[in-house]
Image (spheres, rainbow, N blue to C red):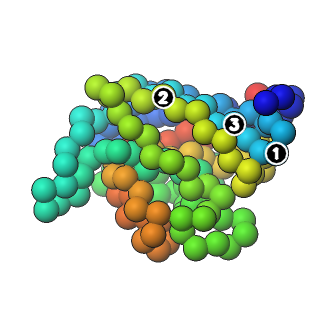
Amino acid sequence: MRRINNRAYAEFKGSIYAPDLRGYVYFYEVEGGTEVFVEVWGLPSYKPANGGEPIGPFGFHIHEYGICEITDPMDPFSSAGGHYNPTDQPHGNHAGDLPVLFSNDGYARMSVFTSKFKPRDIIGRSIIIHQNPDDYRGQPAGNAGKRIGCGLIKAV
């Protein structure tokens, strides 16, 4: 795929649920859409549900607002708002819905293509990593759980 000179970037910081979380995500405009490349360290260890909430795989979404403040430590990054959804779609088809991140001993790396936005569309928004996997059905946000990491999306 031919890259076009339209890029964006975010650097993650962790919440109290993943204080060692760090990493970055790049958004590259390519023909027909955007290539998303993410690399993250310090993800919490996997824990199966066993009647409660699992930890991992990790929900991964673009959110409405470019705010990564922790005003309530028990509900970090709530200032980022809901999922980026410019076409008012049901959850599972939001422009900001991305595949879950699978951790390998706290490390995840993924590249994915989407035709739902271009980097210029998401500059000034945030990208969130959630503690639980997204079910891609629950409304409005897929039951992805606590927000464990946040990054502000900026132009490169």
Residue 134 versus residue 12: which sits nearer the camera? 134
Q: Distance between the residues labelled 3 and 2?
A: 13 Å
Q: Quadrant of the C terminus?
A: top right
Residue located at (33% from left, 52% from top): 132
Residue 126 position (above or below residue 3): below
Q: Please, what secondary structure does the residue beneath circle 3 have?
A: strand
The residue mark sitting in front, 1 or 2, is: 1
Q: Kindly identify which numbered label has been placed on residue 109.
A: 2
Left or right position of 119 against 153:
right
* Location of residue 58 in the rendering, given as x and y in whole percent from the top left corner: 39, 45
Q: Which residue lies furthest to the right in this view?
A: 5
* Amino acid type, callout 3: Glu
The percent coordinates of residue 66 (x first, y second) are: 63, 49
Q: Where is residue 76 in the image (x, y as percent from the top left)?
A: 40, 51
Question: Split into 4 quadrants, where in the image is the N terminus?
Answer: top right
9 lies left or right of 91: right
Q: Which mark is residue 32?
A: 1
Between disc 3 and disc 2, whose residue precedes?
3
Q: Circles 1 and 3: CB distance less than 8 Å?
A: no
Label 1 neighbour load within 10 Å: few <14, some 14-19, many 20+ = some
Asked whether the beta carbons under mark 1 and mark 2 sit within 8 Å of each other, the answer is: no
Q: Is residue 124 visible?
A: no
Q: Which tag, 1 or 2, sits closer to the chain's start?
A: 1
Q: In which quarter of the image is residue 87?
A: bottom right
Is 17 located above or below residue 89 in the figure?
above
Q: What residue type is labelled 1?
A: Gly
Callout 2 amino acid: Arg
Residue extending furthest front?
A: 1
Q: Name the residue under label 3.
A: 35
Instruction: Name the secondary structure under disc 2.
Output: strand
Picture mark count: 3
Q: Nearer the viewer, residue 17 or 140?
A: 140
